[in-house]
Image: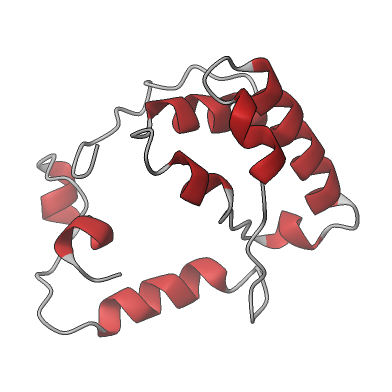
Amino acid sequence: APGQQVEPDACACGSVPEAFVQTLEALPIDVRAAVVQNIVVVGGPALLRGMLPRLALELQAAAMQGENTRALAERLRFTPLDFSPICAAWTGAAIYGALEGLQDYDANAYQSGQPVPDWARDGFV
């Protein structure tokens, strides 16, 4: 749910596909289709030859096994990036940091347990 903080040990998953399915099942049902059609893979491993096709097959297979995610398996799509996947996380953070009217979220806020601001709920998306 928007604004809900996930506990670090909340996902006892053995693999990325298991975590993917658990995350989908935790989402409100009305946003699951949009999420599964807009997957962004970032970081150096996204550049490995064959990584994205294999990940797509594994995510799709895991979704097919979940009773609540089976119908979404065929809709799985990776969102193409206009820049290197290595830079994607930094680019997103730079865009967020450039938005006006945001309150700072610093180490003190994190350590006090304050949830990370939700872009969608707060109207920045």
Residue 46: x and y in percent read 73, 58
Quarter that holds the C terminus? bottom left
Taking depth in this image into account, of 72 and 115 the one nearest to the observer is: 72
Q: How many marks?
A: 0
Residue 120 appears anywhere in the view = yes
- Residue 76, given in percent of the width and then of the height, sits at 66, 45
**As drawn, 124 above or below 36:** below
Q: Residue at x 18, y 44 (%)?
A: 3
Name the quadrant containing residue 119. Answer: bottom left
* Colour logic: secondary structure
Q: x%, y% of residue 85?
A: 65, 68
Residue displayed at 22% across by 44% down: 2
Above or below, 83 relative to 35: below
Query: In the figure, is residue 105 to the left or right of 24?
Result: left
Quarter of the image where one finds residue 78: bottom right
* In this rendering, position of residue 83 left or right of residue 10: right
Q: Quadrant of the N terminus?
A: top left
Answer with left or right where residue 99 lies relative to residue 24: left
**Residue extending furthest right?**
49
When the figure is inspected, residue 112 is found, relative to residue 61, above or below; the finding is: below
Residue nearest the observer in this picture, 86 or 65: 65
- Identified at 38% across, 79% down, the residue is 94
**Residue at the location (67% across, 69% down)?**
80
91 displayed left or right of 38: left
The answer to whether 99 is drawn above or below residue 34 in the figure is below
